[in-house]
Amino acid sequence: MNTKANLSQRIVVGMSGGVDSSVTAWLLKQGGYDVRGIFMQNWEDDNDDDYCSIKQDSLDAVAVADLIDMDIDIVNFASEYKDNVFAYFLQEYQAGRTPNPDVLCNAEIKFKCFLQHALAGGADLIATGHYARKQVRDGVHYLLKGKDQNKDQSYFLYRLQPYQLERALFPLGDLEKSAVRELAQQAQLPTALKKDSTGICFIGERPFRQFLQRYLPTNPGAMVTPEGKVVGEHEGLMYYTLGQRKGLGIGGDGEPWFVAGKNLASNELLVVQGHDHPLLFSQSLTMHDLSFTTPQRPPEGQYGVKTRYRMPDAQATLRYVDDDRAELIFDQAQWAVTPGQSAVLYRDDICLGGGIINDTDTHSIHID
């Protein structure tokens, strides 16, 4: 098990009502640790909605805690979530970017509000069901990729600060997802066969556009080619992301159409034909709001980089522009690098941190 705790330490597990956090708690209990659980309620606007699973998730978390003889508390962080995660989510979409609220949720809620609450209640460490690992070398806590490359979640954890990593455990880091399911069934956990949650927690399975319309006004406009030809109408720039193919509704013959950029000033969506169109590729990017998992920021040089979850590491050279901005120059041009998403640096299996993608060298994104 991927922990360095001793049996005298109290560990509080973040329980989501899913199989991963359930097995995390079970492993720790089996290991003889002093374990408690916390279920975090982060969303309240429509938690009685057909698309929202908060009630069922909390019941599942409590059922697991009861089975393994573990105390559990339900804690409401909805106010903090709305102020520190959801407000940013809306702000970014309104600016034409595509944010990743799961990254911010980990940094601001799961490893900040939850951590503070747990420590105030007498905990020594917190544990989550993330597929990531941690190693201590010369007193430094390093965040590593999970052994299961199909489930590795270090990308979503890159904003964790050293003090947060020091207090965190990832018991599933050395396990494959299939092994976690097997353990859950062997332990007869109520969540053993529960489907994994997908999408953004507060949206659930609901239609994305329908959800955004509650909070942001629609603003239809033209879909245009790089030559300026109007080929369709979009429903609002916020509903589209770079590289998107589905839902464009552009007829005609030839190769499929893809989103290649946005122009907020003219409210135009730039579209191109063909997956390999040059405007879909970027040789470099700039990123801001830098955050690193180690006490010292990585020096300039060559690193592996992910610009989206589950992509293979791309080789790139890091160059700092100033204290809060950096440039990444790729060895090979990358497809659909998207402003608002995160660029995350790796040295082999070590996740070093990264930043929010601000712009790329295609010049196809015009956010005024």
Image (tube, rainbow, N blue to C red):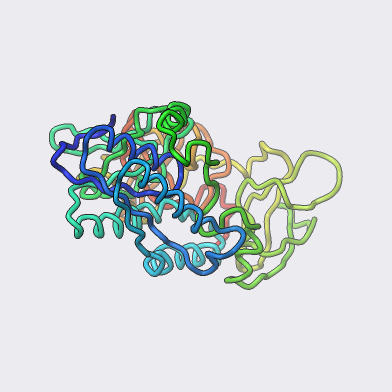
Q: State the image coordinates of residue 4 (x, y, percent, origin top left).
A: 20, 34
Q: In which quadrant is the N terminus drawn?
A: top left
In the rendered view, tell whether residue 255 sits above or below residue 112.
Answer: above
Whether residue 368 is visible, yes or no, is no
Q: Relative to 101, is 160 on the left or the right?
A: left
> Closest to the observer: 140 or 1?
1
In the rendered view, tell whether residue 126 sits above or below residue 178.
Answer: below
Whether residue 262 is visible, yes or no, is yes
Q: Relative to 145, is 268 on the left or the right?
A: right
> Closest to the observer: 235 or 57?
57
Name which quarter of the figure residue 131 lies in: top left
Name which quarter of the figure residue 253 lies in: top right
The residue positioned 65% from the left and 61% from the top of the image is 209
Count of numbered circles on the image: 0
Q: Relative to 27, is 60 on the left or the right?
A: right
> Closest to the observer: 175 or 166?
175
Q: Relative to 365, is 188 on the left or the right?
A: left
Q: State the image coordinates of residue 229 (x, y, percent, origin top left).
A: 78, 56
Q: In which quadrant is the C terminus drawn?
A: bottom right
Q: State the image coordinates of residue 33 (x, y, percent, origin top left).
A: 21, 38
Q: State the image coordinates of residue 241 (x, y, percent, origin top left).
A: 61, 52
The residue positioned 40% from the left and 55% from the top of the image is 104
The residue positioned 45% from the left and 27% from the top of the image is 182
> Closest to the observer: 32 or 350?
32
